[in-house]
Amino acid sequence: MSLLHAAAASLGISSNTLVVTLAMAAVGMAAGVVGCFSVLRRRALVGDAAAHATLPGVAAAFLLTGSRSLPVLLAGGAVSAVISLGLLVLLRRFTRTREDAATAIVIGVSFGVGVALISGLVARGVPGSGGLERFLLGSTASLSASEAVLLVLASLVATGLVIAFAKEAIVVSFDPGFAAAAGWPVWWIDFALVAITAVMVVVGLPAAGAVLVTALVVIPPVAARQWTDRVGVMLCLAGVFGLVAALAGVVVSAVVPGLATGPMVVLAAAAVFAVSLVCAPKRGLLAMAMRPKPSIMMPPEGPRERSRS
Amino acid sequence: MSTPPLLELHDVTVAYHGRPVLWHVDLAVTEPCLYGIIGPNGAGKSTLVKSALGIVPLSDGWVRFFGEPLDRVRGRVGYVPQRESVDWDFPVRAIDVVLMGTYHRLGWLRRVGREERRLAESCLERVGMADFATRQIGRLSGGQQQRVFLARALAQQADIYFLDEPLAGVDAQSQQQIFEVLSSLRDEGKLVLIVHHDLRTAASWFDRVALVDMRLVAAGPTDEVLSRENLARTYSGHLEVLDELGRAVEAGRRTP
């Protein structure tokens, strides 16, 4: 701890700020790793639905308990996120609503309910309700060191689970039919992946807020995919990108007064993404522009087959 | 007691959203062979395979492998799904795809080791794809992708193999290579079931065939089953192609 104080003092910040900043870096890393499989399984918007759906739960938890403690509010957010994902499944199974429409409906409605509750509470001047607005766009200013440590623990558990079950997640994401035939419980593995993503979204709320936290789960994996053809490398890179984006966002919003954390985190992630999009070898725009164009007249099979000898 | 059939389907019936797509299929295969599952588009050929493998739930009937339910013998059953079922932009290389064939034996949490890697390499070698081990799966041709999928099934080290349209959209060289590997599997005493749409090659490739059109029309030795009459019953809704098919089958029979 004294080391921490010394480090904080040498940076000219409080040790609380230092702990919170490092914690957000860990949360960003975990979000990047966990997000890989929601991107690979083409479920990027499901995380978005879960994120927006945390708001009603946060507000309801505040209403019911009157507590402002972060774990209580996040638990409320997790519950309403799970409920909304359940609604999503029911909409898909028992009505003819298509998946994209169902997801859009859940995002819109749950966010509407959340904002209505929070703005209602704030307008009535309910004591402590002002703090709820930070869940919209994210703010780490009011986080305590102990709360931050809790977020780090949850992040590490989520990351650990994804890495431990990477093999199972890969086979289910790549080829669900083969996975089912080989005896893997595809539905449960899918469910676990969505659940871990939902948890990660809740944990990321203080860093980026309900509207933007999904970017932290989606952008680093997509950026990482540019650089590699291997899932293992992609997981590592997404973790690094998420860490960098979260760290940069938190620092910038702390240094420049009046800037919310969430948008800064997302902009930092977007910068990493833009660089990856342009500069990555093989898949980058530059590499693709420099590669000689295959002739449209050539049959797709022929030239590749010949090139093997 | 006599040994149970390698594969036995009894009264297998499948319905999607209340609409039956497969009716009362009874089928027993007692000996290792190349077994063609043949029928028109939408006849339920893939559904038949998926229901046998437990991917699609049965509305009625049962399936036994070696006289046992599938869950007891998963490790002895290999599968090559249709190519369209896969995300080709997925970040896996050919060798990674083949390694997935070893996952079942590894079980939960255990990582791929040196032994699995060696097995996967030998399977790639067997389908003539060793030089492409580190190529991302989407950057292979259709025939090469199919050979990698076959290698993955080989890595399952099964006794019964199901292949769903392994030759669709595949170049001639890959077709020949795939067929040779499948024949060698049969010669090693494995049962290989192949969903197939091309009647011209069916006659010369398969030892036995089943004709399927939402129900089982006929099953048995290829020469007996691929008669004009059976084909007419199978492709009844496709009269315009029948004559051409009949001629094609005759031609296929003449060329060994």
Image: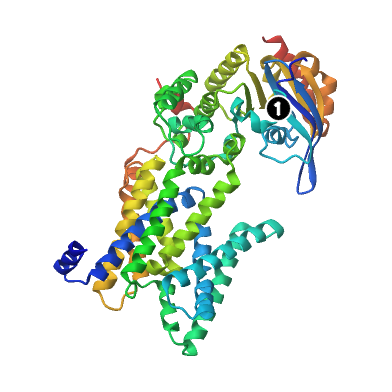
In the rendered view, does B50 fall on the left or right side of B101? right
Above-or-below relation of B84 to B17? above
The percent position of residue B4, horizontal first and vertical second, equals: 74, 19
The percent position of residue A230, horizontal first and vertical second, equals: 39, 39
Specify the farthest residue to the front.
A1
The percent position of residue A215, horizontal first and vertical second, equals: 42, 61
The percent position of residue A127, horizontal first and vertical second, equals: 44, 87
Q: Chain of mark 1?
A: B
In the rendered view, does B207 fall on the left or right side of A48? right
Above-or-below relation of A30 to A136? above
Residue type, mark 1 in image: Glu
Q: Residues within 10 Å of mark 1 (few under 14, many from 20)?
A: some
Q: Residue at x 55, y 49 (%)?
A: A190
Above-or-below relation of B254 to B39? above
Label 1 secondary element: loop
Which residue has dot 1 on it?
B68
Q: Residue at x 34, y 68 (%)?
A: A146
Q: Residue at x 45, y 23 (%)?
A: B119
Q: Quadrant of the C terminus of chain A?
A: top left
